[in-house]
Image (cartoon, rainbow, N blue to C red):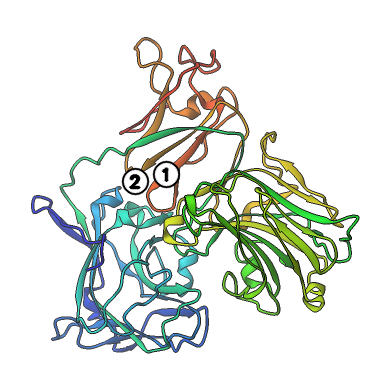
Amino acid sequence: MIAGLSSLIAATHAQQVVWSTTNFVADPIGSYGALVDFQGGESLAVNIVSPGEGGGSSQALEITCVPNQPNINFQTTTVPYPCSGNTNAFLSNYTLSFDMQVSGTNNLSPVNGLQLSLFPNQTTANGYAVFGSHMLLPNTATNVFIAGAGYQHYSIPLSSFQNSGVTMMTTTNFSFGFGDVAYPANLGGGPLTIDIANLQITMNTNPPPPPNPLLTMLPAKRGLRIFQQASDAVYTQEGMESVDINQAWVGLATANTPVSYAIAFQDFDTVANYTMNIQFVPNAGTGPYAVYGAANDLLWRITSGGGASGFTTSLAFKTNSPANVNGGETNVVVATMATTSTNGRGTWTLTFTSDTNGTVTAPDGTSASFVLDPNMAAQFANPVNIFFGTSAGATGGYGQFTDISRIAVTNVGGVNINDDFTSDTNLDTTVWDTTFSRDAGSVILVSSTPSYWVNWNIPDDGFGLETKASLNGGTNLWFSPNYYGSGTASTNSIPTLMGTTLKWTLIPSGCLPTVDGTVGGTPSPNAFFRLSAPPPSK
């Protein structure tokens, strides 16, 4: 069984099948559904085969693959099958179940694990549906699927899935997706076969009351926070890029006028392998796949060792290698350099004194020098964008964050950036483009104090956040933060699942309660928060 994913359904909770492939018996034997081999050369195929699990007239969905070293990246999608009777709004009341057997390679992806996805309201099978509205099961990297063990049964609550715009009660059909992504895969190049049968979703028709989420409130400091919202792959980045496209050092840096790139952290207290990636990309364009698709990239990494293990930093590059990132920058310039910093706080600086020569300096003064190959350096003349993106590095990094106080760029040919995020009232969109983030809402500016970060665990179906100045009665009632914000043109950030377990929202000072509970009243020195079901009416 998949560790941590099995669910026991109490006998008192009646189950109704709301979606099923009916063992694929109505689908013709042979080539089936849709597939996309993003990496290429993996000999990927999807077929309906007979018999399926249990034999007889049952059939199975079969995926075959020969991994193309060193990477693997594919997505498959079934044809859509209708839903009916899915009348409950809460994902926690639905369960996906199936039987699966693996032949050939034992572990499908030692880095990131399988990607199980559900795609709503499809018109046809579409392997690219993973880029649209879907539900993705994260955190399967720890699961080893044993080859040769025969069919095993898996039962997974839909509340375990990360939801991207799926509402059960408006879903008329589902397609099922089975994908695998890893850089590098290291699967040995052996053939792999996956058979899936008895695939269905059941709904609990007599659900218990929803559990009460646990809420935490933390003071927020002024500055810029980047969350690792994505939880589908440990290399997926959240962050921003420079709007100005003339950020290169080439042809500009000298010993008397060095070009420097500095980033100052207020907090970088995070888990091992969590990384800030600063990437210099010529002719980059925009969007979350701009670095991935670029032929050239100089990558400066700042990586947490996890607490007492301190931090490391390194410099590497790729040239003439599009569609390759975080694994493609294998040409090491500065080998991993350890620092004494245990929290990453302070200013990290990359400095060039010529086209080829420079240093990397950590907050504790630790530094290392480097010399670039002139042929390599020449490929990084303007136009060049700078991308600042966090990546999880390991599954424990999902949902982690960094707080940044300043980014400064000096002596470049374009805009010399000197952004003090602790004094900004809004993120300057003439300087920064946050569409580099794979997920919107991962980059949040704290622009006022007092402000508070509030988080709570999922599932949180049916609950809403409310605040109050005093726990005593009177006119001071529980209202939503945006009730108070309506008087100050403020809103709290949309509560968003960051990673796999916690939703976060920023409550700015303008959304805090007033003394008498009225909009525009005297701000209260105290604020209490709670989650209520149903949510507050205003």
Query: Mark 2: few, some, or many residues within 10 Å (few <14, many ≥20)?
Result: some
Judge whether 41 appears above or below 154 on screen.
Answer: below
Query: Mark 1: few, some, or many residues within 10 Å (few <14, many ≥20)?
Result: many
- Residue drawn at x 50%, y 56% is 305
Which residue type does callout 1 highlight?
Answer: Lys
Of the numbered discs in the image, which one, if any, rests on residue 3?
A: none
**Whether residue 153 can be seen here:** yes
In space, the residues marked 2 and 1 are separated at their CA atoms by 7 Å
Residue nearest the observer in this picture, 344 or 473 = 344
Of the numbered discs in the image, which one, if any, rests on residue 503?
A: 1
Residue 323 placed where, x, y %?
A: 61, 76
Residue 192 placed where, x, y %?
A: 35, 86
Question: Which residue has dot 2 on it?
Answer: 458
Q: Decide: marks 2, 1 in contact (CB < 8 A)?
A: yes
Residue nearest the observer in this picture, 172 or 339 = 339
Judge whether 92 appears above or below 107 on screen.
Answer: above
Residue 29 placed where, x, y %?
A: 29, 89
Which residue type does callout 2 highlight?
Answer: Ile
- Residue drawn at x 25%, y 67% is 2
Q: Secondary structure at mark 1?
A: strand
| Residue with the most extreme right position | 256
Looking at the rendering, in which quadrant would you find the C terminus? top left
Residue 245 placed where, x, y %?
A: 79, 59
Q: Taking 354 as reference, is 109 left or right?
A: left
